[in-house]
Image: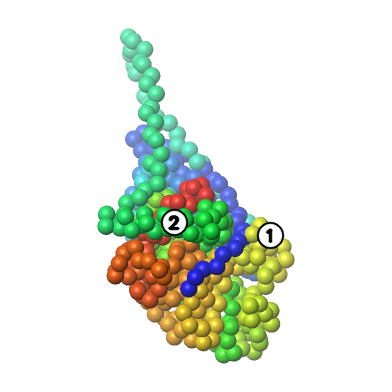
Amino acid sequence: MKRRIAWSVACLMAVFCVVAVLRPAYAAVGCRVTYAVTNQWSGGFGASVTVANLGDALNGWTLTFAFPDAGQKVVQGWNGTFAQSGSTVSVTNASWNGSVASGGSISVGFNGSFTSANPVPTAFAVNGTTCTGSTPPPATTPPTTPPATPPTTTPPPTTPPAGNVWNPPSQLVQPLAAVWTHQEQTYSNGNLYGFKNYGWDQLFAAGGAINYCVRWDSTAHVTAAQRDSIHAALQRQYQKWMDQLLDNGQGWNNWPYTQVPVKVVGWAVRDRAQLEWSDTSVDITVGNINENAPQCAPACGRFFHQDGNYNGCPGGAARHYDHSLWLTAGFGGGAGGDWGQRMGSEYFLSNVNASDIHIFLHELGHTYGLDDFYDWDPTPGQGFIMKAGSATQITEFDKWMFRDWWRHLKSRYGR
């Protein structure tokens, strides 16, 4: 189950809106909004919205914005309750993310539809206050009698950056340190920090979403129902790793994404007749054989385009794919790397509704850089998903190994 590596970039549209607002003098409000189109296809798109709270702590929030085009609609949203009236969209906090500390952030996302155009919204408000990216000075009342002695101005104290949070359970500190040292010494011939196509890189390049190609390396037919169940399983299983970076629904150590949308944009087969559907919800590549298996168009693959140039992709950057799910008939075990994850087609389909597809979870860990443990065990006898065959779900130790990668690489993404 050893990983293999290489690299590329994806599409992002972002707009920054900011606005300061006055509450009563005791509670300054301010916010900055980043809106990103994470995917776009014919008539549809995915988007993420991140709100930085620049003012006092919020206890309940409603985000509002207006679509510029009358044909733009929200279809499905997450991390809040979405409503739309005409072109105006409102998002109210969920039960678990209503409290936002000063300096904290709100992250929501949605899938939408459009008719003729998909322009980016340019005005946002939180709790009725337009977001401009700053907070106003508190209102003051001048004294009725001038002070006898001019007041002394004392510069406000400066607070140094908190730095990387690192708070694993005490019993895991030593084994985690041993794992990281081992990875620094062995990963990619000692080039751990120089490699630029980890799953982390792919996720941030695409603005917090992931696209997949399914390589159907089998002679079996696939029904539309099986296709949909595979797509849904990818979303559920992928989110299991992403959830390891959340504490009480909030991103740990400045992690920005509470939900990572996963979209399958293509299937690759030897024979079109194997796919028993006629709709055009995914691109279908027929007869493009690489490594003796069908493969989606290289022009659309991040593995092949380190520069993020998808000009040769028929659907453009919106139809690129970050990972491949390579399902091979009769394949035992699995393999994983920056290109995606491989395992038996029979295994994946037989576990498609399982709570934990443990081979997939193990191989996805490799996509994000996590190591194999064939020749040593940092936690003897305890078992964890990245030690193949010793666990069937992500454990506390896996979670903290995953977090260790994030804290070492997050500066790469300005976090």
Q: Secondary structure at mark 2?
A: helix
Residue displayed at 58% across by 82% down? 216
Residue sticking out furthest to the left: 171
Whether residue 22 is situated above or below residue 377 in the rendered picture? above
Q: Quadrant of residue 135?
A: top left
Whether residue 33 is situated above or below residue 272 in the rendered picture? above
Using a 10 Å C-alpha cutoff, classify the residue at mark 1 as few (fewer than 14 neighbours), some (14 to 19) or many (20 or more).
many
On screen, residue 79 versus residue 282, left or right, reads left
Residue displayed at 64% across by 89% down? 273
Residue displayed at 55% across by 77% down? 326
Instruction: Please say whether residue 136 is visible from this viewpoint.
Output: yes
Residue sticking out furthest to the top: 148
On screen, residue 306 versus residue 123, left or right, reads right
In this orientation, which residue lies closer to the viewer: 324 or 273?
Answer: 324
Whether residue 146 is situated above or below residue 220 in the rendered picture? above
Rendering coords of residue 24 (x, y %): 36, 36
Rendering coords of residue 33 (x, y %): 50, 48
| Residue behind mark 2 | 405
Q: How many marks?
A: 2
Type of residue at label 2?
Answer: Trp
Q: Quadrant of residue 264?
A: bottom right
Who comes first in sequence, dot 2 or dot 1?
1
Whether residue 303 is situated above or below residue 154 in the rendered picture? below
Question: Which of the two marks, 2 or 1, is nearer to us in this view?
Answer: 2
**Distance from label 2 to label 1 (Cα)?**
27 Å
Q: Quadrant of residue 81?
A: bottom left
In this orientation, which residue lies closer to the viewer: 411 or 132?
Answer: 411
Residue sticking out furthest to the front: 375
In this orientation, which residue lies closer to the viewer: 142 or 15?
Answer: 15
| Residue behind mark 1 | 309
Residue displayed at 41% across by 39% down? 161
Type of residue at label 1?
Answer: Asn
